[in-house]
Image: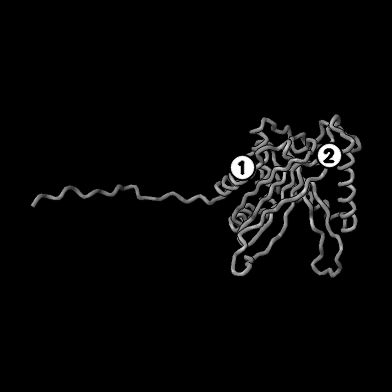
Amino acid sequence: LWGYSPARKRAFTAPQTPMNEPIYNARAIAHTTLPLAAMKKVAHACDATLNDVALCLLDAGINRYLAAMGRKPDHPLVAICPVSLHDPQAKQATTNVSAIWPVLGPVSAPVQRRLETVKASTRAEKARLGSLGKEAAYSYAVMAFALSETLTIARPEALGLRPANMLISNVRGPERPLYLNGARLETFFPVSTLIAGLGLNITFMSYADQMVFGYTANGSALPEVESMARHTTDAFAALERATRPRKAGRVTSGRRASRPGPRPAS
């Protein structure tokens, strides 16, 4: 916060949005499902991770939702994304988690450009986190969350100090379908909690051949959150079209084929 200025976009300068309004009892819940294989195909085509693609789609959907509300932000949204620090070889059951605060895509950018911005932002955040070491990275997350809640309780909106606009988490689910007495488990519906100052919590979870996005929102500030889910699906369709290889045009010779003339009557 040293040398803070509202004109400079740096830490704790997320834009003011309905997601940052006071949280009351009402909750709005929605979900949407996307094909996992198609998402992986898009990620591969764009040299991006699956998380990058998910963040891009959510960012596009939320910005469209806010524009429809007449609450378009004046600069890019900021998300809090938990990051696992777990070492696969470690045998101890300890808390190994931190978080990154990526700045998302330009407010009105097309979806492909938005993805490029998200990629650069998440890579920079992960590189910075990786340079800290595990213990420092964990302490950093604890301190940042504590500072975020302190700023929220202190109501610093006069200064524009906002850590983020939403919390977005990725939960890895079962890779194969699950069954109970022969009945297939069709899908999961992630539902999460809201934390101080963040009225939108999105969890996306893989299961078999699908990716399910669950939206938990502050119902008093974010009505009809199901439209946010629809906008996410529309953003994926747009990204698929933008990354689909173009088919080469048909090449024909310069001489036109002559059509057979009328056959003489017998």
Residue in the image at 46% along x and 51% along y = 248
Q: Can you say whether 8 is above or below 243 in the image?
A: above
Residue in the image at 85% along x and 29% along y = 158
- Please give left or right for residue 106 compared with residue 159 in the image: left
Residue 31 in sight: yes
Residue in the image at 85% along x and 66% along y = 93
Kindly identify the amino acid type of the residue bearing the numbered disc 1.
His
The residue furthest left is 266
Please provide percent x and percent y for residue 216.
72, 46
Residue in the image at 35% along x and 50% along y = 253
Q: Nearer the viewer, residue 241 or 166?
A: 166
Please provide percent x and percent y for residue 111.
62, 43
Please provide percent x and percent y for residue 132.
87, 54
Query: Which part of the image, by quadrant, shows the N terminus?
Result: top right
Q: Can you say whether 107 is above or below 201 in the image?
A: above
Q: Which residue is mark 2?
A: 12
Kindly identify the amino acid type of the residue bearing the numbered disc 2.
Phe
Q: Which residue is mark 1?
A: 231
Q: How many marks?
A: 2
**Quick one: SS at disc 1?**
helix
Residue 103 in sight: no
Which numbered disc flags the more N-terminal residue, 1 or 2?
2
The picture quadrant where one finds residue 226 is top right
Please provide percent x and percent y for residue 134.
87, 58
